[in-house]
Amino acid sequence: MEPISIGWMKIPKKMRQKLLNNSFCADCGDFTKIIDYTIEEDYFGLIVQGKCHQCRQEIVRVLER
């Protein structure tokens, strides 16, 4: 797993958990927990890439600045 970004750590812990536990999976058609994730910072914000807790398909969550 890559180092966690500074931008991610600036988000309060409770909010980070909320974001990880409320990611949309297109395959399941519902909101789910994102697991085995990595976080990247880019110009527009944070990109959380991981897998759906239910079906294990790849999902991405974008957190805009």
Image (spheres, helix red, strand yellow):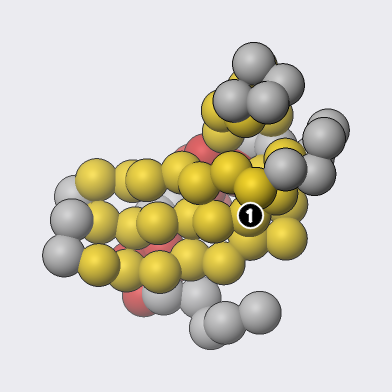
Residue 21 shown left or right of residue 46 in the figure: right
Q: Is residue 43 above or below residue 62?
A: below
Q: Is residue 28 above or below residue 52?
A: above
Q: Is residue 55 above or below residue 51?
A: above
**Residue at figure coordinates x 25%, y 56% from the top left:** 45
Measured as percent of width and height from the top left, residue 64 is found at 24, 45
Q: Can I make out residue 10 in this image?
A: no
**Residue at figure coordinates x 32%, y 69% from the top left:** 41
Measured as percent of width and height from the top left, residue 52 is found at 72, 40
**Residue at figure coordinates x 50%, y 75% from the top left:** 4
Measured as percent of width and height from the top left, residue 15 is found at 48, 42
Q: Residue at the far top: name it.
A: 29
Total numbered labels placed on residues in the image: 1
Residue 38 shown left or right of residue 54 in the figure: left
The amino acid type, in three-letter code, at marker 1 is Gly
Front residue (pair 60, 3): 60
Q: Is residue 50 above or below residue 25?
A: below
Q: Secondary structure at mark 1?
A: strand
Q: Can I make out residue 54 in this image?
A: yes
Q: Badge 1: how crowded within 10 Å, few (<14), some, or many (20+)?
A: many
Q: State the image quarter where residue 36 is shown.
A: bottom right
Residue 34 shown left or right of residue 19 in the figure: right
Measured as percent of width and height from the top left, residue 3 is found at 53, 83
Q: Pick the quarter of the image with the N terminus.
A: bottom right
> Label 1: which residue?
50
